[in-house]
Image: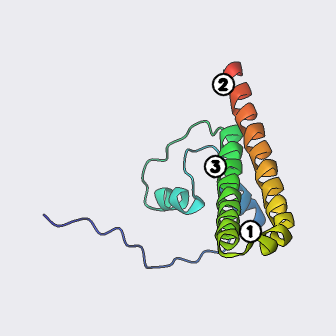
Amino acid sequence: MKEKNNNRNKWLHLRLNSKEYEQIKKGFADTIHDKLSDYARCLLLKKPVIAGYRDTTMQEILAGLTALKKDLHGVAVNYNQAVKKLNALGNLEVISYLPQLEKEHKKVLVTLQSVDAIIHKITEKWLRS
């Protein structure tokens, strides 16, 4: 059985005035579509547009969690490199490297506090609903 080809490699450039653009953006905001291009494609191809309530609070939370994930990954990589360097150094060199490790430790604590704040925000939202 042949698979459906979803490779979109053709571009359609469209010029709008400010009023038209705002009208499309307003219509997009009232749908469940994540991308304006998906919404516009549905309109142009006369496919059904699924309207719905878009929970902006959850979108903010997801954006925050995504940023935190990226931050935590960077901190983890830095910390891992620091530990590897400590293992390779002699005892005297370890003492000179401790301030940098403390700096990385503080970054971890700040990021964990951010995670805690996001979790608190999610908890409050769930308790209200």
Classify the position of the C terminus by image quarter: top right
| Marking on residue 27 | 3
The residue depicted at 35 percent of the width and 67 percent of the height is 6
Closer to the observer: label 1 or label 3?
3
Which comes before the other along the chain, label 3 or label 2? 3
| Marking on residue 126 | 2
Q: Is residue 111 left or right of residue 12?
A: right
Q: In which quarter of the view is residue 16 placed?
A: bottom right
Q: Amino acid at mark 1?
A: Asn
The residue depicted at 54 percent of the width and 40 percent of the height is 51
Q: Secondary structure at mark 3?
A: helix
- Residue 105 coordinates in the image, percent (x, y): 79, 55
**Which residue in the structure is indicated by mark 1?**
17
Q: Amino acid at mark 3?
A: Gly
- Which of 11/47 is in front? 11
Mark 1 is surrounded, within 10 Å at the Cα level, by few (under 14), some (14 to 19) or many (20 or more) other residues, namely few
Q: Secondary structure at mark 2?
A: helix
Mark 3 is surrounded, within 10 Å at the Cα level, by few (under 14), some (14 to 19) or many (20 or more) other residues, namely some
Q: In which quarter of the view is residue 79 placed?
A: bottom right
Which comes before the other along the chain, label 1 or label 3? 1
Q: In which quarter of the view is residue 7 placed?
A: bottom left
The residue depicted at 79 percent of the width and 61 percent of the height is 104
Circles 2 and 1: CB atoms closer than 8 Å: no
Closer to the observer: label 2 or label 1?
2
Circles 3 and 2: CB atoms closer than 8 Å: no
In this view of the protein, can residue 25 be seen by the observer? no
- Which of 122/74 is in front? 74
- Residue 91 coordinates in the image, percent (x, y): 76, 70
In this view of the protein, can residue 58 be seen by the observer? yes
The residue depicted at 47 percent of the width and 56 percent of the height is 42
Across the whole image, how many numbered discs are drawn on residues?
Answer: 3
